Image: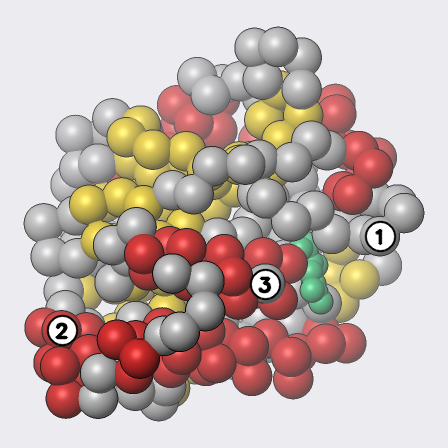
Amino acid sequence: MRVSLLQIAVDPDEPVAARRERAAALVRTRHADDLVVLPELWHVGAFAFDSFAPAAEALDGPTAQAMSEAAREARVWLHAGSIAERGADGGLFNTSLVFDPDGRLVRTYRKIHRFGFDKGEAVLMDAGSEIVTVPLPETVLGLATCYDLRFPELFRALVDAGAQTLVVPAGWPERRRAHWTLLARARAVENQCYLLACGTAGTHAGVPQAGHSIIVDPWGETVAEAGPGEQILTAELDPERVTKTREEFPALKDRVLGR
Ligand SMILES: O=C(O)CCC(=O)C(=O)O
């Protein structure tokens, strides 16, 4: 199973519509992949708090439409990262979108843990509450977003729901890059899953982004890691490794708490 993480640069000088078209054009080139992943809030920037409400879109808005068409053209599964979603009830959510190779929006995930403590996303957005998995032909995706990476109980719940490949779009800041890499590997090894963590590059709202998107295998080893700039990170995964790792080292079966 070939996967690519599109580590897009989010630059405040680039209009949202231009970045949307650039991202769609990149997705359209990925026809040799099975799964393509974009970062968190790449259309607007995860730290561009003032733009969340004005840039918010419905689930059939321009970003979703562009991603649907790109997935269909490339014939790939597309985790299109997340958008600022204006819900039908007026709520504002940080929502991930997954499209199938026919361009159908098959699942959405509203970020559960909002970042910012008493400002930013934490006060501007509403929290999701649903644990979301997505069955693909080769694996089962478990969805989480950025700050969620710090909450292992979410990932355990995803494993209980059948997840084999954890997908984490992010807009992680450079300042805490060491946490990003450490947590990505920890979530993979403790849950015996592949983990695909796709961040942004560049600097927006004065916050330099970490980049360093990373693909980790179920043994906790790094399969591929990006640098700091805009980059496409590609790797070949063996979905059977999840089952084999869980059979050969059955630590998940020894759980005592939280079952
Ligand atoms: O947890 C962190 O250090 C970064 C989280 C974050 O930037 C986010 O969730 O948008």
Residue 101 lies, in percent from the top left, at: 17, 37
- SS category of the residue bearing label 3: loop
First in residue order: circle 3 vs circle 2 = 3
Residue at 25% x, 54% y: name it: 162
Q: CA distance from mark 1 to mark 3?
A: 15 Å
Crowd rating for badge 3 (residues with CA inside 10 Å; few <14, some 14–19, many 20+): some
Q: Is mark 1 within 8 Å of ligand 1?
A: no
Which residue is label 1 attached to?
117
Badge 1 density bin: few <14, some 14–19, many ≥20, Cα 10 Å:
few
Verify CB contact (< 8 Å) between mark 1 and mark 2: no
Count of number-bearing discs: 3
- Which residue lies most toward the front here? 256
Left of 244 or right of it: where is 179? right
Residue 243 is marked as: 2
Give the residue displayed 19% in from the left and 79% down from the top.
246
Given this view, does label 1 or label 3 mark the residue nearer the observer?
A: 3
Judge the density around disc 2: few (<14), some (14-19), many (≥20) Cα neighbours within 10 Å.
Answer: some
**In the figure, 166 relative to 10: above or below?**
below
Q: Which mark is residue 151?
A: 3
Residue 119: give x, y in percent of width and height. Answer: 88, 45
Residue 146 in picture, x, y percent from top left: 59, 58
* Residue in the image at 9% along x and 49% along y: 137
Mark positioned earlier in the residue sequence (1 or 3) = 1
Q: Amino acid at mark 3?
A: Phe
Identify the element where label 1 is drawn.
loop
Q: Where does the image place residue 117, in percent across and percent down from the top left?
A: 84, 52
